[in-house]
Amino acid sequence: MLLWVGLGNPEPGMARNRHNIGFMAVDTIAIRHGFGPWRARFKGLVAEGTIAGEKVMTLKPQTYMNASGESVQTAAAFFKLPPAAITVFHDELDLMPGKLRVKLGGGAAGHNGLRSMDRMLGTPDYWRVRLGIGHPGVKERVLGHVLGDFVAADRDWLIPLLDGLADAAPLLVTGEAEAFMSKVAQAVQAAEGRA
């Protein structure tokens, strides 16, 4: 079994924040692959399904971003999952909007959700799907940027990115990270070509 975690904040008023792109990613995957309904469990919301023959549980921690690790650790411990069975989808300031990168392990780079996961899991050795939201240019504007809502113009890259990663999800299940990244990039580029 795989645990796919989307990071975000549970407040309804924050649903469209850039910081919540992780929630948006797992929502899109769950819909595209016909997962069961979301249920409250592990201090979060979970939905289960099958992708490429593998059972996948999606998790949206409801502990707020800074305590995301509490929810993830509870679920991982219950299912006795090793870190490599966990993939987290999160916003990434250091990537241009619409770009995506996958990596195993690494630092938290100032991301409080990742910092919480590292602390609670006792290791940074889980998979990360870094979803680019761009950087506002100066450090003083970062908080307002990540907690700000996506704007209408962002739909041009956000929807193709989310649709592309949901379509390419089987490649993530089978461990083909490079192919997954390429397929998502092609989906975003094709949408840009039509714009």
Image (cartoon, rainbow, N blue to C red):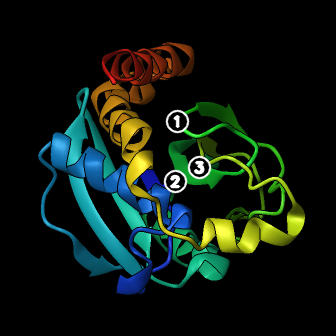
- Quarter of the picture holding the N terminus: top left
User: From the viewer's perspective, is the residue at label 2 or at label 1 nearer?
Assistant: 1
Cα separation between marks 3 and 1: 30 Å
Question: Is residue 2 shown to the viewer in this render?
Answer: no
Is residue 67 toward the left or the right of residue 58 in the image? right
Q: Position of residue 103 (x, y in %)?
A: 68, 33
Per the image, the residue denoted by label 2 is 81
Q: Is residue 123 above or below residue 37?
A: above
**Residue 138 versus residue 101: which sits nearer the camera?**
138
Residue 82 is labelled as 3
Cα separation between marks 2 and 3: 4 Å
Residue 98 is labelled as 1
**Residue 79 versus residue 115: which sits nearer the camera?**
115
10 Å crowding of disc 1: few (<14), some (14-19), many (20+): many
Q: Position of residue 168 (x, y in %)?
A: 35, 25
Q: SS at mark 1? A: loop
